[in-house]
Amino acid sequence: MKIAVLPGDGIGTEIVGEAVKVLNALDLRFEMETALVGGAAYEAHGHPLPDATLKLAKEADAVLFGAVGDWKYDQLDRPLRPEQAILGLRKNLGLFANFRPAICFEQLVDASSLKPELIAGLDILIIRELTGDIYFGLPRGRRVATDGHFPGTEEAFDTMRYSRPEIERIAHVAFQAARKRSKRVTSVDKANVLETFQFWKDVVTEVGKDYPDVALDHMYVDNAAMQLVRAPKKFDVVVTGNMFGDILSDEAAMLTGSIGMLPSASMNSSQQGLYEPSHGSAPDIAGKGIANPLATILSAAMMLRFSLNQPEAAERIEAAVKTVLAQGLRTADIFSPGTTRVNTHEMGAAVVKAL
Ligand code: IPM
Ligand code: MG
């Protein structure tokens, strides 16, 4: 089992360090190799995704990823910015299916900004298409407009596009995931305005005919954003495009109280995956040792289950996380009066002990 460990920037190194300790505490043997990515790789090698890092990721069974990005790189040319590393990995490894669960842990119902009764027991799975849409669609760029409202002036443009096979394969992923849950899929689109998403809706509907046991409904993205805060428990599996999925998955994550708790998996068609916390590099708290490592530790559990075929080990880690929460241990992001505040390292150590 070969794991490429890519901690990245900001709190990435701190949280990945704790996840690695948890993996090492299992009675399994891994070959782990660490490499630079993002701003850290740019500083050392002049590129956010050096060839050696990409090669390591491609050859591994799974990638354990921290986070990339820092405001100090905002002025760099786009191809050199840290975010290009994660986009490049998704594209080069063909990681088209992004799983972002939003699960509310029993002990953390009060950490949410929503009323406890709205989120107690919440268990949503957002499946975001990850290698298409306006994120990767060409052409894109800047030019002088020849038409539109202000011909002759500077303009910028991106292209939203989806092919039939791209929609079909992510729809199959969603229906199959729903079969293992409560058999409901909500496909989120903007078919009332966008050609791309009318096509999305049509193709998802066609694929849905192969899954008569799964209930499919469709929702416009603006309504979905509203329903997620109004009645989040009505959702089971949500499938959507890259751009809408980016936005809705942050919203869904925050329903649970802290984005610091939520893991994610990005898979290709050969079970190879990249596992990362749903949150970012949080440069404002980097180096302080206060970040919550649980999202990354839970991402390592997803890695064991989806790419490394070790479901028991995944369950052990998830149970250990529940144990430390039941013990009342909390990092700053999930702290509330009456619980015990711990730092990144103490939280990781507590999970190891609970294992
Ligand atoms: C995410 C992030 C990335 C995205 C950025 C860092 C490129 O926001 O994984 O959701 O937009 O996909
Ligand atoms: Mg995002």
Image: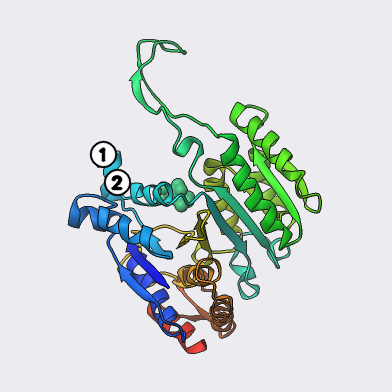
Residue 118 or 202: which is nearer the viewer?
Answer: 202
Crowd band around label 1 with a 10 angstrom C-alpha radius: few (<14), some (14–19), many (20+) = few
Residue type of the residue flagged with mark 1: Asp
Could you tell me if the residues under marks 2 and 1 are in contact, i.e. CB atoms within 8 Å?
A: yes
- Picture quadrant where residue 142 is located: top left
Left or right of residue 198, residue 321 in this image: left
**Secondary element at tag 1:** loop
Tell me where residue 314 appears, x and y as whole percent: 55, 76
Location of residue 32 by image quarter: bottom left
**Horizontal and vertical percent position of residue 10:** 32, 61
**Disc 1 designates what residue?**
77
Query: Does residue 122 show up?
Result: yes
Is residue 194 visible in this depiction of the protein? no
In the rendered view, would you say 90 is above or below 189?
below
Mark 2–mark 1 distance (CA, rounded to whole Å): 7 Å
Q: Which mark is residue 112?
A: none
Determine whether 70 is above or below 29 in the image: above
Q: Is residue 42 left or right of residue 295?
A: left
